Image (cartoon, rainbow, N blue to C red):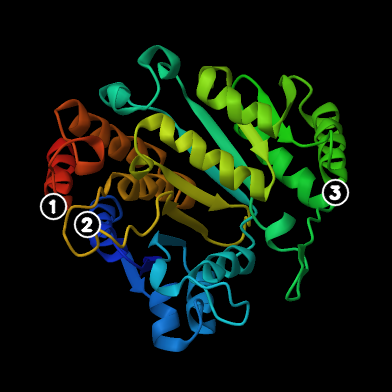
Amino acid sequence: MATRIVTLPADGIGPEILAPAVDILKRFVADVEIEEHVFGGASIDAHGTALTDETLAAAKSADAVLLAAVGGPKWDTTDPNRPRPEQGLLGLRKGLQLYSNLRPVRPLPALYDASPLRREIIEGTDLLVVRELTGGIYFGEKTRTQDSASDLNIYSREEIERIARSAFQAARTKVTSVDKANVLEVSRLWREVVIDVHQREFSHIPLEHVLVDNAAMQLVSNPTSFDVIVTDNMFGDILSDEAAMLTGSIGMLPSASVGNPDGPGLFEPVHGSAPDIAGQGIANPLAMFLSTAMLLRHGLNLDSEASTLESAVDQALDNGLRTRDLGGTASTAEATQAVLAAL
């Protein structure tokens, strides 16, 4: 039976980086069926909504979903009645019950000098941000008048328990739970539940609690002190992008959204749609390739194949590959060829 992968090129540079990623995926999965759907801004233009019922149904029945990039200034609006591309992403995560977002951050030695931080600060960094993805302030009840607005930040014990479990299961040395328990009641519940899960199920793994403002400082001053960071939806959104810059370019980081054992995961690069360079053939496809590796590992249980692809990206960079965001001149096609040659 063929492996079914739903692909969502979406917006900006999305189609340019997804096409070579699909070609690479086919090298690792012999009997694969690719089903492409419009999504995000492209779907708003075509159908008036960022996520159609047809696309969601196709994603639910797939073995994995590979997404490129969503959004752009064309669809930016403060009108709550107009659709936004990001609503499609929230709807897809919710519809697929993907509550755990995994973002590995591992600066590569070949790119240490591309980081805005000194080499001695980032050297040896190898951390994972585990972000709760389907609860919190992004999904809470929203109100809006001409003069005031509110967003409800709400978490249940069950939601916190399951994301804490994901973090402890991924940990090698320790878990750092990030909250704002000195101010927010929801963070006090978060901390209480994480402690409870730790004591009941994972007492052999060290646990520390860090306030989000301190965590933001520690990420740029002492990133090697982290192993697994677990935090809520909004804090995770912000901290994972901050952590991304340790690598020298947000164009280098993949992500996986998982959680539903009976459904597909969603795999996408962390970067945006970069509409300013769309269509020029100069986008960095490496985060897309690394997201494909995460699909192989977490979506299809092909761990050795994932490692092979990740090693090929490392080797291409060791051999001098540099796209423009990394200070070089390589095009999307040249970056792809460099990775294929390493394979």
Which residue in the structure is indicated by mark 1? 333
Determine whether 239 is above or below 117 in the image. below
Report the amino acid beneath label 1. Answer: Ala
Quadrant of the rendered image containing residue 117: top left
Determine whether 96 is above or below 153 in the image. below
Identity of the residue drawn at 57% across and 37% down: 129
Quadrant of the rendered image containing residue 314: top left
For residue 227, say whether it is visible.
no
Going from N to C along the chain, the mark reached first, 1 or 2, is 2
Residue 96 image offset from top left, x and y in percent:
60, 65
Q: Nearer the viewer, residue 233 or 73?
A: 73
Q: Nearer the viewer, residue 318 or 220?
A: 220
Identity of the residue drawn at 38% across and 77% down: 42
Report the amino acid beneath label 3. Answer: Arg
- Distance from Cα at disc 2 to Cα at disc 3: 42 Å
Which residue in the structure is indicated by mark 2? 20
Determine whether 184 is above or below 80 in the image. above
Determine whether 230 is above or below 207 in the image. below
Residue 6 image offset from top left, x and y in percent:
40, 68
**Neighbourhood count class around disc 1 (C-alpha, 10 Å): few under 14, some 14–19, many 20 upward:** some
Circles 1 and 2: CB atoms closer than 8 Å? yes
Q: Is residue 63 left or right of residue 204?
A: left
Going from N to C along the chain, the mark reached first, 3 or 1, is 3
Report the amino acid beneath label 2. Answer: Pro
Q: Secondary structure at mark 1?
A: helix
- Distance from Cα at disc 1 to Cα at disc 2: 8 Å
Which residue in the structure is indicated by mark 3? 157
In the image as oriented, which residue stretches furthest toward the top?
A: 120
For residue 127, say whether it is visible.
yes
Identity of the residue drawn at 62% across and 55% down: 261
